[in-house]
């Protein structure tokens, strides 16, 4: 992934917009943005929901 954010890469690969991913994961778009940028760590529960939304294995986000 060469330094790219794994969530962004998988979201793009699945053809999802950021807002669509946030909605499907049941989190707010600002929360998703802040977790992607490193401003928030995100709870394990939220990270699991983010991985499940585009059907990605949790290990692929780490």
Image (tube, helix red, strand yellow):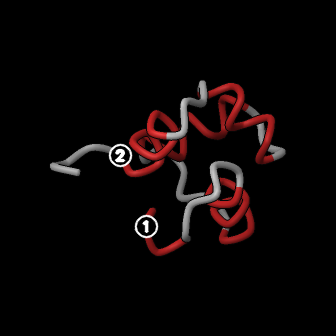
Q: Residues within 10 Å of mark 1 (few under 14, many from 20)?
A: few
Depicted 42 relative to depicted 7: above or below? below
Cα distance in 3D space between marks 2 and 1: 11 Å
**Toward the viewer: 37 or 2?**
2
Q: Is 56 left, or right, of 48 in this rendering?
A: left
Please provide percent x and percent y for residue 48: 68, 66
> What residue appears at the point 63 percent right and 62 percent down from the top-left corner?
47
Q: Is residue 41 above or below residue 22?
A: below
Tell me if residue 9 comes above or below residue 16 in the rendering.
below
**Residue annotated with mark 1:** 60
Looking at the image, is 56 positioned above or below residue 53? below
Q: Earlier in the sequence, mark 2 or mark 1?
A: 2
Judging from the image, what secondary structure is the residue with disc 2 in?
A: loop
Image mark for residue 5: 2
Seen at 62% across and 39% down, the residue is 32
Q: Residue at x 39, y 42 (%)?
A: 9
Q: Considering the image in quadrants, where does the C terminus appear?
A: bottom left
Q: Residue furthest left?
A: 2
Residue farthest to the front? Answer: 14
Mark in the foreground, 2 or 1: 1
**Label 1 near label 2: C-beta < 8 Å?**
no
Tell me the tag on residue 18.
none
How packed is label 2: few (under 14 Cα within 10 Å), some, or many (20 or more)? some
Q: Is residue 28 left or right of residue 2?
A: right
Q: Whole-percent x and y of residue 18?
A: 60, 28
The percent position of residue 31, horizontal first and vertical second, equals 66, 39
Relative side of 59 to 57, left or right: left
Dot 1 falls on a residue whose secondary structure is helix
- Comparing 50 with 56, the one in front is 56
Q: At x 43% / y 67%, what residue is drawn?
A: 60
């Amino acid at each position: 992934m060469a330094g790219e954010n794994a969530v962004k890469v998988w979201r793009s690969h699945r053809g999802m917009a950021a807002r669509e991913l946030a909605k499907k994961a049941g989190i707010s778009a600002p929360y998703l943005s802040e977790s992607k940028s490193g401003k928030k760590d995100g709870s394990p529960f939220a990270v699991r929901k983010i991985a499940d939304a585009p059907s990605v294995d949790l290990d692929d986000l780490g």
